[in-house]
Image: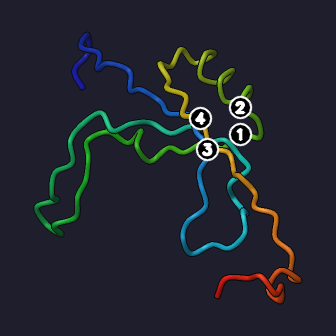
């Protein structure tokens, strides 16, 4: 980057990751994550053919215990951020005895 020309600050996303389809538990979904959106487009590397970008901010991923900590970090650093609210779980109450009810639809 040449001196005097400033690239626009990348926009950050703050979210709580959802569990993957391969997980049965909710480990790793309690913390809030701040990561940056890609500022430059990805191009194939001429030697290996891997997709790469000119900026390295897309490799940064910060984890916070609370949403307030993540927002405080973003405001302290002067980052423009987007908050993505998590979808809350709707627990379905089930009982093992319901498998043997006489009026159960098979």
The Cα–Cα distance between marks 4 and 1, rounded to whole angstroms, is 15 Å
> What SS does tag 1 mark?
strand
State if disc 2 and disc 1 touch (CB < 8 Å): yes
The label nearer to you, 1 versus 3, is 3
Rendered view: 91 above or below 31:
below
Which residue position is annotated with label 4? 85
Which image quarter is the C terminus in? bottom right
User: Which circle's residue, 2 or 3, is located before the other in the chain?
Assistant: 2
Quarter of the image with the N terminus is top left
Dividing the picture into quadrants, the one containing residue 19 is: bottom right
Q: CA distance from mark 2 to mark 4?
A: 10 Å
Query: What is the spatial separation of the Cα atoms under label 1 and label 3, in whole angstroms?
Result: 18 Å
Residue occupying the point 69% across, 20% down: 72
Q: Name the residue rendered at 47%, 19% in the picture.
A: 80
Query: In the visual, does 8 lie left or right of 34?
Result: left
Q: Which residue: 65% across, 23% down?
A: 71
**Which residue is disc 1 drawn over?**
64
Pick the front one: 64 or 44: 64
Q: Earlier in the sequence, mark 2 or mark 4?
A: 2
Mark 3 residue element = loop
The answer to whether mark 3 and mark 4 are in CB contact below 8 A is yes
Q: CA distance from mark 3 to mark 4?
A: 7 Å
Residue lying at 30% horizontally and 33% vertically, measured from the top left: 39
């Amino acid at each position: 980057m040449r001196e005097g020309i400033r690239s626009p600050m990348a926009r950050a996303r703050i979210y709580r990751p959802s569990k993957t389809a391969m997980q049965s538990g909710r480990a790793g979904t309690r913390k809030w994550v701040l990561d940056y959106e890609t500022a430059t487009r990805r191009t194939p590397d001429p030697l290996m053919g891997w997709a790469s970008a000119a900026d390295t901010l897309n490799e940064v991923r910060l984890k916070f215990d609370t949403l307030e900590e993540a927002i405080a970090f973003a405001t302290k650093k002067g980052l423009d951020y987007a908050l993505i609210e998590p979808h809350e779980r709707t627990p379905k109450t089930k009982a093992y005895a319901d498998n043997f009810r006489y009026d159960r639809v098979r």
